[in-house]
Image: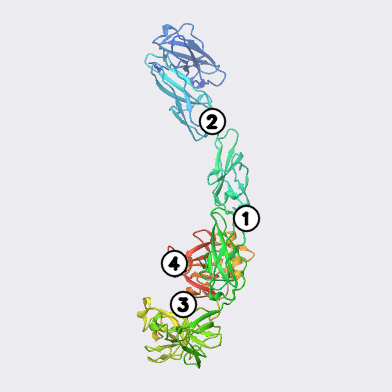
Amino acid sequence: MATLTSVVMLLTVFAQAVPASAVPSLVAPTPTITGTAAVGQLLKANSGAWGPSPVTLKYQWYRSSAAIAKATGSSYKVTKADTGRSLTVRVTGTKAKFKSVTRVSLGATVGSVFLTTRTPTISGTPTVGSALTATSLSWSPAAGLRYQWNRRGVPIPGATRSSYALGSADGGTLISVTTIASAKGRATTTRTSGSMTVAKKFARTSAPTISGTARVGSTLAAKLATWSPAPRFSYQWLRNGTAIAGATASTYTLVAADAGAVLTIRVTGRAAGYTPVSRSSAGIGVVGEFTRTPTPTISGSATYGSTLTANPGTWGVPGVHFSYQWRSNGIVVGGATAITYHVSASDIGHTISVDVTAAAPGYQSRAVTSSRTPAVPTPPVTGTTATRTQRMSRSTLNSNQNGWYEQGRVLTLVCYQRGQSVKGYFSSSFPNGGWDNLWYRVNDGMYVADVDLETGTLDPVTPACPDQPVADTTNATVKVTTQRMSDATLNSSQSGTYGAGARLTLVCYRRGQSVQGYFSGSFPGGWDNLWYKVSDGFWVADVDIETGSNDPVTPACSTPAPPPISGDLVTRARSWLDARVPYNQGKYYTNQYGTYRQDCSGFVSMALGLSSSYVTGTLPQVMHPISKDELQPGDFMLNSAAGNNGHVAIFMGWTDAGHTHYRSWEENGAVGYAFEQVVPYPYWPSWAGSANYRPYRRN
C-alpha cells in the first residue's frame, strides 16, 4: 500500500548578519504531490501560493532522504529505482530582504499501478438543499476508496464522504468528486468525475390564489405574490387534481364539466440557474347553474277527489332530483310534497299549482312554478238516509224540527258542521260510545245528522259551512271542579271555577296549553292541549269535562288565517342563498336589502327587513310561538338560547305527509354559507339543544 511519510524540513539561509527580528518571513505553504506514484508515471509538485509575490521557487526531488540527481523541476517521472521508496519534493522560496524558506511535502511511496481504475459518477439532483452521492465501480485489485468533493476544482474542506449535501455556497458552481484509491503494493491513485452545475434555490416563493366567482360560465384568475428572484411563470388548471387539457393560461372560464368539482391552479416558476419550483393554490368548489329550466305542467283533471300529477320537464343535467310543493290558490298546502296531489274538499273553488325545485350535485337548486289550473268546481255531494231521521233547522236536536227525511231519500249535501253529538243508525261504526257530532246542511236549508246518513265515510264529504253552528247545550259535563280561565292557558286570568257536574255549552275549541286532569289516563303521557270556549266567554280544559270524545266536538274557534308566505321575505332570503353569503359572526354583508351580520339571526333579520341584526335571544321580540300543526312556509324554527347555543332557520314547508322533515333556509356555521337543506323536526339531533327548537311566526 502507498504510504505518506511526514518529513518537514525547514532551512533558513541568512543573506547577511542582521538581528532575526529585523528580517521578515515569507508565506510558505507545504507543497503537495499529485499524480500516481508508480514507475513511468509523472508526479507534479503543487507549491501552493507563496508570498508576498513574486517569490523565486526552486525544487529538489528526494528518494527517501537522498536528493535525486537532476530532479530539480516542478515535475518528476518515476523510475524503477524508485520502487518501494518514498518520494518527496523540497521547495525553497527566496526573495530580497526576506528570509529564505524551505518546505518539504509528504512522501509518496512508489508502488505498482492498479490494473483497473474507475472514474466515479455522481447521482442526485444538483440543486441547493439536495444531496449528491458518489458511486465508483470495483477497482482491480480491490482498493480502499476515499472521497474528496471539489467546488470549481478546489477541494471542499471536510467534504470527504461518499455523499455531499449541497449548500448555498454551491449554487451556480461546478461540483465534482475525486476518488482516492489505495492498496498494498499499489500506487495511491486518484480519479475525478465530470462536473455538475448546481442550480440555485429561489429565496422566496408563494402559493397562488384564485379570484373570481366559482360558477359555471364565470372566469377565474390566478393571483401571484412576490417571488425572489422574479421568474417567468407557466400555469396549469386542475379539476379534482387532474390537469385540464389546454387550460394553461393565467385565467380559466368555467364550463359545465366543472360543476361540482374542485378547481386548483398550479404555477411553475423558472429562472436561469435556478431549480424550477411548482406551487398550487387552495381548492375552490364550483357551482353550476341550470341552463334549461322548463315550466312544469300538471296532468289530470282539477276536480274534487281527483289526483293531479306534476310533470317537471327535461332539465338536461345528469342526476337531477326534483322536489315538489303544491299550492291551493297560491297558498302552500302543508305536507303536499309528493309528485301527485289529491284534490280535497278544501280545494273547491281554488286554483291548483305546483312548485318544482330541481337539484343536482354541484348545481345551485332552482325552483319553478307551474301555471294554475282552473278553479276546482263544487261537486254535487249526496247522501242517502239509512233510516227515517229528523229534519232540523240547526245542527242540534234542540233546534226546530221541520218534519222528517224518510228512509232511502237521496239528499243533496251543501256543507257540514260539527254540532250536537247524537246516536243513530250507524252508531256502531263510531268510537266514544257511538256518538257522532257531524251534521250536514241540505240544499233545502235544513240539517241532517250524519249518523243516520249513508255517505260512504265517517269523515265529512263536503266543505265546512262558513257560518258557526249552534253548539249543543248539553254536550259537556264537568267531571271535577276545574278552572274558569280567560284564555286557553293556566297562565291567563282565572275567574272562579266550574263545579263538578255542571253542564256547559261549548262554542268552539282551540289547542292551547298542555295540562293534566280528570281524564289524563286517556291521553299519552296524561297531557292534553284541547280547550273549549264556553258560552259565557271563558275557557275550560277538555281533560276535566265529559264530551264523549278525546277529539274536538265543536268547530275550531275563529282565528285569523296564518299570513301567507311573504314574497318579499322569499326574495330577500333568496338573495343570500344565491350569493352563498359566507358565515362569519364578526362580519357584515351588504346588498340591495341593507347591511346585516353574516350569521343565522342576521340572515333572518335581513329576510324580515328589520332595522338591525337581532340575535337569537331578541328575535322573540318580533315573532311569537305557534304550534307544530300551524307551521306554514315563511315561519321560523328558533332556539332562542343566547350566543353560539342558539340558532334560527326559515321554515319552507314539509317534505313528507308525516311532518317529520322540512325544508330549511339558513345561514349555518357548520356548512359555512347560506343554503337550503332538509332537516328532521324540530332540528338535527346531533346539534346541542336540538330539543329546544320551537315554531315561531312573525308578529
Q: Is residue 202 visible?
A: no
Q: Which mark is residue 457?
A: 3
Q: Nearer the viewer, mark 1 or mark 3?
A: 3
Label 2 is placed on what type of residue? Val
* Camera-nearest label, 4 or 3: 3
Report the disc number at residue 198: 2
Residue topped by disc 4: 690
Where in the figure is residue 402, as x and y percent of width and height?
Answer: 51, 92
Residue denoted by label 1: 291
Q: Is residue 562 above or below residue 668?
A: below
Q: Position of residue 374 (x, y in %)?
A: 62, 71
- The kind of residue on which mark 4 rests is Ser
Question: Closer to us: mark 1 or mark 2?
Answer: 1
Q: Is residue 617 visible?
A: yes
- Residue 16: x and y in percent read 51, 14
Helix, strand or loop at label 3? It is loop
Inspect the image, locate mark 1, and give the three-letter code of the amino acid beneath it: Thr
Mark 2 nearby-residue class (10 Å; few <14, some 14–19, many ≥20): many
